[in-house]
Amino acid sequence: MKIKKQHILAAALVLALGAAVYLNWQFSGTPLISPSSKELGAATYVSKDATATADEPVSKTNAEMTPEGKLAKARTERTQAQDKALSEAKNILELSDSSDEAKAEAVKSADAIEQRILAQSIVESILEAKGFNGALCYISDGGCTVTVQKDDLKDDSPVIIKDAVLSQLDIEFNNIVIVDV
């Protein structure tokens, strides 16, 4: 039973890391598959009053979304992934038959996630105060990725963004990545 709980905690951490990697890839703008004219499984609007062709997707794709919409969607996905990782760690703590070692590891994991969430929030607040509306910060073990709107970028923006990150994190200057949307 002890090994199973450790596997659950490890799986939760891998899931959180996977979500961070996916969101980083999502904002990097490099497609894995070339876009096609039709999407498999695309829904069409059906109404007795209006007609739609099969080529008209109802919802906007990621490329058609506004930068604000992309950032809001990414913020929601990031929050959901972090909440899931925290709930997994808390579930391990609540199990009465968990070993002390598993509980200590769960506490350590939950504390690390909470520290990252706090640091992300502070960096985002600093960037908003500096004029970057809706900036989004992802912190991982290897570094930090900051996503900002393309319209907010100026010549000195990279220095301002990296300074805001370095004020909260002890990471290498080269491990800070800036992505524009």
Image (cartoon, rainbow, N blue to C red):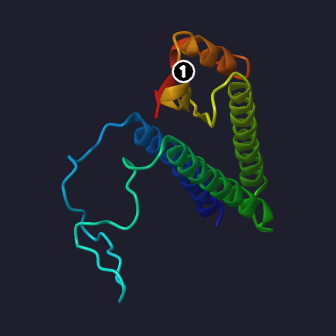
Indicate left or right for 108 with 28 as reference.
right
Indicate left or right for 90 with 29 as reference.
right
10 Å crowding of disc 1: few (<14), some (14-19), many (20+): some
Residue 115, how many percent across, how many down?
75, 37
Residue drawn at (63%, 37%), measured in percent from left and top?
134
Q: Please state which of residues 37 and 7 is positioned toward the viewer in this rendering.
A: 37
Residue drawn at (55%, 43%), measured in percent from left and top?
68
Residue drawn at (63%, 14%), measured in percent from left and top?
160
Examine the rendering and report whether any part of residue 32 can be seen: yes
Q: In the rendered image of this protein, does residue 111 appear above or below residue 153? A: below
Indicate left or right for 54 with 125 as reference.
left
Give the residue number, with chain letter if any, for mark 1: 176
Residue 84, how many percent across, how many down?
64, 58
Q: In the rendered image of this protein, does residue 43 appear above or below residue 151? A: below
Q: Which residue lies furthest to the front in this view?
A: 49
Q: Please state which of residues 28 and 19 is positioned toward the viewer in this rendering.
A: 28
Residue 148, how many percent across, how many down?
54, 31
Tell me the quadrant of the picture where the N terminus can be found. Answer: bottom right
